[in-house]
Image: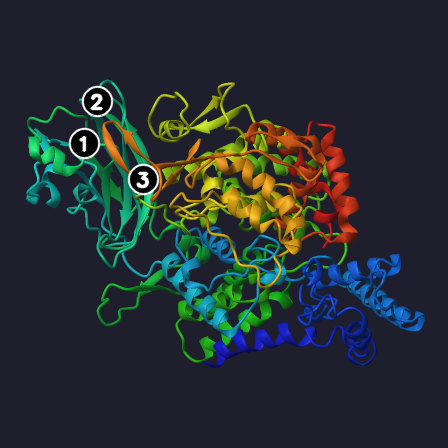
Amino acid sequence: MRTRFWLSGGFLLLLVVPAVAQDAPVNSTFESAIRPVLVAHCYGCHSKKAAKVKGNFHLDKLSPEFADASSREAWLEVLKRMRSGEMPPKGKPRPGAKETRAVLDWIAAGLKAAAARRAAEGRVVLRRLNRAEYENTVRDLLGIHVELREMLPLDGSASGFDNVAEALHVSSFLMDKYLEAAEKALNIAIANGPRPKLIKKRYSLKDQHQVKVTTERVFRKLDDTVVLFSSSPWQAVHLYQFYPPDRGQYRFRISASGYQSARKAVTYRVDAGRMGMAGKTGLIGYFDAPADKPSVVEFIATLEPRATMRIHPYGLAHANHVHKIGADKYDGKGLAVQWVDVEGPLHDSWPPASHRRIFGDLPRTPAPIYNFSNRVEVSSKNPEADAEKIVRSFARRAFRRAVTDDDVKPFLNLVKGRLAKKYSFEQAVRVGLMGVMVSPEFLFLREKVGKLDDFALASRLSYFLWSTMPDEPLLALAEQKKLTEPKTLRAQVERMLKDPRAASFTENFVGQWLNLREIDATTPSHILYPEYDEMLKESMLKETYLFFEELLKGDLSLTNIVHSDFAMLNGRLARHYGIPVVGGWEFKKVKLPRDSHRGGVLTMASVLKVTANGTYTSPILRGTFVLERILGTPPPRPPEGITAIEPDIRGAKTIRQQLAKHRQVASCASCHAKIDPPGFALESFDVIGGWRDFYRTSGNGKPVILDGRRMHYLHGPKVDPADVMPDGSKFRDIDEFKQLLLKDRDQIARNLTTRLVTYATGAAPQAGDQAEVNAIVERIGTNNLGMRTLIHEVVQSRLFMHK
């Protein structure tokens, strides 16, 4: 317990103490000299005392702490307005010259102190690894596949990302969870038992429980082949005979084909995990089974003990329909599964690579305990010397830099202390390794003020593009002090972008920039949107990630974000978009028809879904999204007391009619003139991103008949996507709106550059950094605003290369 207190409580004290009272000199006069002036001359319009807060700017809530970036930016705005004489406005009582000078001098002093602190401390404060980075780092440090992020509390978010330093706090609870996670990871990495028994077996679905006991006639047996005719979820087939006792990686090979499928592929889904009410399953993926000819798919999945896998066909008939006819007579399409091969746990040698990465070839000797008679532990004839070698090597990789004697001494002392208390060699070393894994050097990205050294640059680069620690090539270049060379750095960026680990960049950056992580925040109404399903959702996400990767791969212009002449589609999404493409799960780059309204992220179903709820769309939500995420010009928060508008899904009033009344309110009109146009332009797309000319309603409207079936929703009012931009420009639909956005390509580029710098460095650029942001935009403008070029320019910039 004392060790835990030293590792967590003592560590937290080290982090908290230096931050106390940084702004005390600036703020000591605020209450006595500054606030009275603001109360007398500003609070009448900019505080809770005001009937309507002008500009939604609350001076009474503005913190006098200039260390906070948002407060600093707000006080800078106050300074500009007061210096120009704009505030207080004409006709309002103004403070005297002495009072005005006192306020201006106080703000200037605060800004100057903040600038001095930034010069002394750097733009980016000490940054902790977030949950995803921590899990990936442990994976690459130990060479294991393990889920750890769910053990840790949720990360905070700032400036749109969860890797921004100011939002990543530390608590004693978090430190305890880090200890638990480190212990779990080491238990998996270190082998204390014999090699697990290898399972290598071919299974037939005819022997599985669901096929054998179901009373519904939905399976046809053909020798060892089983044909699945239904996509009803309760008729998915679990591989119950496969019930492994050991955790590890397992290789699966599934032979399947489309059956009676009119020469078209049949898609199926595979999940793996612990099935049942208390189990946790995860999607492995969707696969296409070609018509009539068996095809084998292969994948490797990490499974916990007693987990299994499940096969679920997509797009087949309902079980009741098949049962009425009987599987033996049914002539509809099905999925024929010939066999499933399983092999694992997979280990090239024993002890596994993760074990040898820590202990090398040190011998293992018997160390039996209750209920584990064949348990072994690593032993040593020279425990202190071997412990030093192990801890030093481990710390070098964990700290992501060269280590000194002083770096490893505290952890060696932990080991020696345990050895003195008669701990076994392995148990003593484990304590030292856990100490390394909860130390600030492991959990934080520690950077010195000024230009980053090669090791700090290696870490910043790898956490930017891979969300994990640097690999050996990066560390080797850092040790040689070559990474900061521009040509070398560029070559490493190219290498890293081609690496499979770059998928983390796409998922984590795009997922947060476009808010795709909230795809499951709402579930579309099954009455209004019965066509929505899991495969469509997965296709939505996949399209957006593949689109971004296509821009990166081809260095395509980032203007494609607003409009492109291509899309990344599979059969399910193409059907949703009304684009004629061959069906199936596999994605391909598709040139869009000239009359298509798709192209760019604004018209992607994923973006359209996360900017709506499960029942209706809101021009306010979507308009705000465009201003904030695409243009980087977020509107101010709505005034207090203004209620949100909920569209009438009964169809009595359109959202345009409701907003027209809302825009007559003086305090709302100016903002809605900016928010509503992009929102209305996107009204041609429904809750799940489908094109619509009319709203779907549940009350007033005409019946809708599809494929001979009357739908539960009604044909409501006509959609009107036209509007006028703040500058007077008019548009009739989304196509014309996108062309208006493209008139200011540099603003789109500035926004994306700002977001990339924020994500890459862990801190958002401030007002003083705009010149560097603009310089990046100017440089990429010479190469058609290429996406890959932008990544290179961000990495080579002063903002990235300095703390």
Quadrant, the C terminus = bottom right
Compute the Cα span from label 3 to label 2. Answer: 31 Å
- Badge 2 or badge 1: first in the primary sequence: 2
Residue 337: give its label.
1
Q: Nearer the viewer, mark 3 or mark 2?
A: 3
Whether residue 786 is visible, yes or no, is: no
Q: Which residue is mark 3?
A: 713
Compute the Cα span from label 2 to label 1. Answer: 14 Å
Q: Which color mode does the image show? A: rainbow
Secondary structure under the numbered disc 1 in the rendered image: strand
Residue type of the residue flagged with mark 1: Val
Label 2: how many residues lie within 10 Å, few (<14), some (14-19) or many (20+)? some
Label 1: how many residues lie within 10 Å, few (<14), some (14-19) or many (20+)? many
How far across and how far down the image is residue 440, in percent?
Answer: 59, 66
Residue under the image location 22 percent in, 30 percent down: 255
Q: Nearer the viewer, mark 3 or mark 1?
A: 3
227 sits left or right of 305 in the view: left
Residue type of the residue flagged with mark 3: Tyr
Up-down: is 531 above or below 344? above
Residue under the image location 49 percent in, 63 percent down: 386
Residue under the image location 24 percent in, 18 percent down: 263
Residue type of the residue flagged with mark 2: Ser
Q: Judge by depth and name the residue closer to the eye, 493 or 45.
A: 45
Secondary structure under the numbered disc 3 in the rendered image: strand
Q: Which residue is mark 2?
A: 261
Quadrant, the N terminus = bottom left
Up-down: is 251 above or below 226? below
208 sits left or right of 453 in the view: left
Asked if the residue at tag 1 contacts the one at tag 2, i.e. Cβ–Cβ closer than 8 Å, the answer is no
- Badge 3 or badge 1: first in the primary sequence: 1
How far across and how far down the image is residue 702, in percent?
Answer: 33, 34
Q: Judge by depth and name the residue closer to the eye, 47 or 122.
A: 47
